[in-house]
Image (cartoon, grey):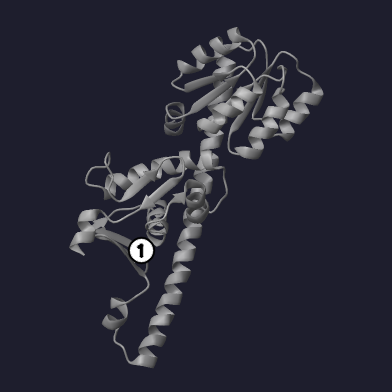
């Protein structure tokens, strides 16, 4: 039940139909369910909307002037593969149904479909998408954990070799250990999988820790959202979708890291490009 609530109140739906009464009706029905609903009267307009705004689910008519629904579906699946697709058409054929399935359509509804059928289809499609995102998130966390454990093993082995060859004690090795990343008053200990700010421990999830670590490695450089998703969570996605995925993680990171999350000093947003980790000017002066 909790997943349904999360999906309903965070999802953005795009209705694509060249008939205005259909667009108006669907927008009213879905808006009442708590979705943010956008509309487009053509395939070209739909692609423009999706270039500017992250969309979770698209409900598309098959027969439209210009770009038809199947062609639009192919474009969406190529550019935004995690987007849920639902067909709503008055021109159903076996051929179009099979093509829709090949393009990964979640459902194939016939006009006129009742409000309950439409709401059910959208809800189930979004729940399926949410489960898939959570599955990939979990796999990425597991992979990140395995990589971290492997890296820790190499570091421990390197520490032993350094001490044996140079006679350095543990304290000497730790003082110059490559497992420590420092940006301003932020310190990330890769061996202990721990981050502190001004000596205060930050309670981070695996994805948050991985995101902060990658940004720290690239401190002072802008990192795209798709790169963060790829490097931290382990899968490829379009930049627009990656922004939606990373937006929540960055917001949570700022709440834990920034004195004023609404006016961040560490994690900066470079509009239209990505995020950058920097040391606040006050921290640089102290150092």
Residue 37: x and y in percent read 50, 21
Please report the residue visible at 57 percent of the width from the left and 13 percent of the height from the top. Answer: 23
Above or below 53: residue 224: below
Residue receiving disc 1: 193
- Residue at x-position 65% and y-position 23%: 43
Specify the quadrant of the image occupied by residue 57: top right
x then y, percent, for residue 92: 76, 17
Residue lying at the far right of the rendered structure: 95
Could you tell me which quadrant the C terminus lies in?
Answer: bottom left
Left of 156 or right of it: where is 230? right
Q: Is residue 5 left or right of residue 87?
A: left
Work out whether residue 66 can be spotted: yes
Which of these two is toward me, 188 or 129? Answer: 188
Residue sitting at 37 percent across and 66 percent down? 190
Q: How many marks?
A: 1
Q: Where 234 sits versus 171, above or below?
A: above
Q: Secondary structure at mark 1?
A: loop
Residue reaching furthest left? 286
């Amino acid at each position: 039940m909790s997943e349904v609530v999360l999906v309903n109140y965070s999802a953005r739906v795009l209705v694509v139909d060249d008939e205005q009464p259909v667009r108006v009706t669907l927008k009213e029905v879905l808006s009442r369910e708590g979705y943010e609903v956008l509309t487009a009267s053509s395939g070209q307009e739909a692609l423009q909307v999706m270039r500017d705004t992250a969309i979770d689910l698209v409900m598309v008519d098959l027969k439209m002037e210009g770009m038809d629904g199947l062609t639009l579906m192919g474009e969406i699946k190529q550019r935004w593969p995690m987007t849920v697709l639902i067909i709503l058409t008055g021109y159903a054929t076996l051929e179009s149904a099979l093509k829709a399935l090949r393009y990964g359509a979640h459902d194939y509804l016939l006009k006129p479909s009742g409000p309950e059928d439409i709401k059910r289809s959208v809800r189930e499609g979004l729940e399926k998408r949410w489960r898939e995102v959570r599955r990939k998130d979990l796999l990425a966390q597991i992979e990140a954990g395995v990589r971290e454990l492997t890296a820790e093993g190499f570091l421990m082995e390197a520490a032993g070799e350094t001490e044996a060859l140079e006679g350095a004690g543990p304290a000497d090795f730790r003082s110059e250990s490559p497992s420590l990343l420092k940006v301003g008053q932020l310190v990330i200990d890769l061996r202990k999988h721990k981050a502190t700010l001004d000596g205060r421990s930050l309670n981070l999830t695996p994805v948050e820790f991985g995101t902060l670590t990658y940004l720290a490695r690239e401190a002072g450089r802008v990192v795209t959202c798709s790169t963060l998703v790829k490097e931290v969570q382990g899968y490829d996605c379009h930049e627009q979708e990656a922004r939606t995925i990373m937006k929540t993680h960055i917001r949570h990171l700022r709440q834990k890291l920034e004195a004023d999350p609404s006016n961040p000093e560490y994690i900066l947003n470079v509009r239209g490009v990505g995020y950058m980790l920097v040391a606040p000017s006050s921290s640089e002066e102290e150092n």
